[in-house]
Image (cartoon, rainbow, N blue to C red):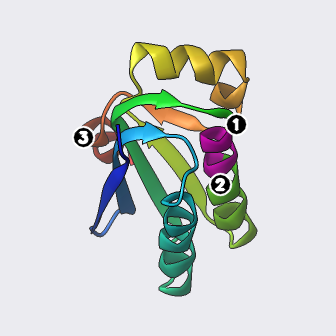
C-alpha cells in the first residue's frame, strides 16, 4: 500500500499522520524533510501518528530513528501514537519502545501533555 501523509500543528505539537506501509521508499526523504521544516519553524514536540500504518520495514525503522535524531539534536522530542498490534510488536522486538514514548492515540498525547 502506497504511503501518504498529512501534517497538522497546534499549540502542543506538530503532527505527522502516516497512512500506508512505512518502507522508506521515495516518500521517506519527504518525511524527514517535514521534521526538518518543523525544526526550522521552532518546533520542539513532534508527534507521528501510526494508526493507519500496517507495516514498517527496516528502512521505515531507520526513518523513524532519523526523525528522532534530528529532533533530539535540536532539543526536541518525537512521540509515536496509535501503533497497530503488528507495529507495537515490531517496536518491542527492535527495542524502539525504550527509545520512543508511545501513546495510545493523539488525544491521549494531548491529554497528557
Q: Which residue is mark 3?
A: 107
CB-based contact (under 8 Å), mark 2 and mark 1: yes
Mark 2, mark 3: which one is toward the viewer?
2
Which comes before the other along the chain, label 2 or label 3? 2
Quarter of the image with the N terminus is top left
Q: Which residue is mark 2?
A: 68
Which comes before the other along the chain, label 2 or label 1? 2
Point out residue 62 in the picture as x, y percentages from the top left corner.
70, 46
CB-based contact (under 8 Å), mark 3 and mark 1: no
> Residue at 75% of width from left, 68% of height from top?
73
Magenta span: 59-64
Which comes before the other along the chain, label 3 or label 1? 1
Predominant SS of the magenta segment: helix
User: Is 103 positioned to the left or the right of 67 in the image?
Assistant: left
- Spatial CA span between label 2 and label 3: 21 Å
Mark 3 Cα within 10 Å, few/some/many (few <14, many 20+)? few
Mark 2 Cα within 10 Å, few/some/many (few <14, many 20+)? many
Point out residue 29 in the picture as x, y percentages from the top left corner.
58, 66
Q: Which residue is mark 1?
A: 99
- What is the secondary structure assignment of the residue under circle 2? helix
Amino acid at each position: 500500500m502506497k504511503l501518504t501523509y498529512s501534517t497538522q500543528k497546534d499549540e502542543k505539537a506538530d503532527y505527522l499522520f502516516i497512512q500506508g506501509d512505512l518502507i522508506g521508499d521515495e516518500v521517506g526523504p519527504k518525511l524527514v524533510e517535514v521534521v526538518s521544516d518543523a525544526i526550522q519553524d521552532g518546533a520542539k514536540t513532534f508527534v507521528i501518528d501510526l494508526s493507519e500504518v500496517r507495516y514498517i520495514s527496516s528502512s521505515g525503522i531507520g526513518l523513524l530513528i532519523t526523525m528522532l535524531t534530528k529532533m533530539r539534536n535540536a532539543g526536541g522530542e518525537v512521540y509515536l501514537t496509535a501503533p497497530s498490534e503488528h507495529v507495537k510488536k515490531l517496536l518491542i522486538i527492535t527495542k524502539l519502545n525504550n527509545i520512543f514514548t508511545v501513546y495510545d492515540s493523539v488525544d491521549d498525547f494531548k491529554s497528557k501533555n
